[in-house]
């Protein structure tokens, strides 16, 4: 199955460091970030998971659950979490899926057999650095794959969450490099006349197709 923006996130059952889960039940009424990393006890991944743990309050504020994944077992995950906590000075609380049989990795297309930069000593692909943002309706709203060499910018992931949550609430989109609090763009489906009624803080018409309004936050 090819996963695209708008696909329903496939449901699955898995073992995690916080117990067994059914993914859709885990999501519940929350937004969810499902992210995979190549392997436990690898350097870039260690820094990434430390960062995610440090951002826990930011995810909570946005009603976002976070869940990691790699094709390692529970015992390795648990030992590695001790290291992550020690190295990054955090208390990692989000679950990590133990996908040693690669069932979830296959389901979410997280194995790239062509990427020679992301293989173990035997040449077997590690899971790639995938990020899926899934909304409370279980719809996939963002998919990104990063190279094995490059740690992710989780502030960017939070920025996209802010944009998606705002866009779901108001008829707006967000410009390049937008961040929470900046002006937003009136959705193209809204006429300027209508925009002037629904955005009481005012509408600035840069071009008929580019109308800005202060952030409704
Ligand atoms: C890392 O996390 O450092 C890493 C993992 C797999 C391939 C390359 C780097």
Image (tube, rainbow, N blue to C red):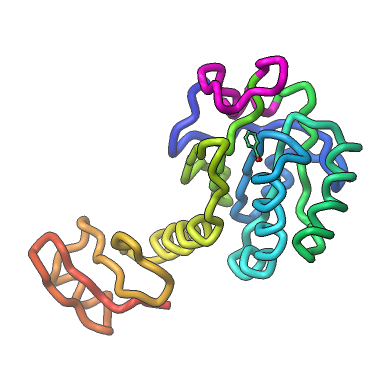
Q: Is residue 45 left or right of residue 80?
A: left
- Residue at (65%, 51%) from the top-left corner? 48
Residue 149 image position (x, y, % from top left): 55, 39
Q: In this view, does 92 lie above or below 110?
A: below
Image quarter for ligand 1 equals top right
Residue 7 image position (x, y, % from top left): 48, 34
Q: Is residue 128 left or right of residue 75?
A: left
Magenta range is 104-124
Is 143 in the magenta?
no
- Residue at (83%, 50%) from the top-left corner? 81
Number of numbered discs overlaid on the protein picture: 0
Q: Is residue 141 left or right of residue 26?
A: left
**Secondary structure mainly formed by the magenta segment:** loop
Residue 147 image position (x, y, % from top left): 52, 36
- Residue at (62%, 43%) from the top-left corner? 35
Q: Which residue lies furthest to the bottom in this view?
A: 201
């Amino acid at each position: 199955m090819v996963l695209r923006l708008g696909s329903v996130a496939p449901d699955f059952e898995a073992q995690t460091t916080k117990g067994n889960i059914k993914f859709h039940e885990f999501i519940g009424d929350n937004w969810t970030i499902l992210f995979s990393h190549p392997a436990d006890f690898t350097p870039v991944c260690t820094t990434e998971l430390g960062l995610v743990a440090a951002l826990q309050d930011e995810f909570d504020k946005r009603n976002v659950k976070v869940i990691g994944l790699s094709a390692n077992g529970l015992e390795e995950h648990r030992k590695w979490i001790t290291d992550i906590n020690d190295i990054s000075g955090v208390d990692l609380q989000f679950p990590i899926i133990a996908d040693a049989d690669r069932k979830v990795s296959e389901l979410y297309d997280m194995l790239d057999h062509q990427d020679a930069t992301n293989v173990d000593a035997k040449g077997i692909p590690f899971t790639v650095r995938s990020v899926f943002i899934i909304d409370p309706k279980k719809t996939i709203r963002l998919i990104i794959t990063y190279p094995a060499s490059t740690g992710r910018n989780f502030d960017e992931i939070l920025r996209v969450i802010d944009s998606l949550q705002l866009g779901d609430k108001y008829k707006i989109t967000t410009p390049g490099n937008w961040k929470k609090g900046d002006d937003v763009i009136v959705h193209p489906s809204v006429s300027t006349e209508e925009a002037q009624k629904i955005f009481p803080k005012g509408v600035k018409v840069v071009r008929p197709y580019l109308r800005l309004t202060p952030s409704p936050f």
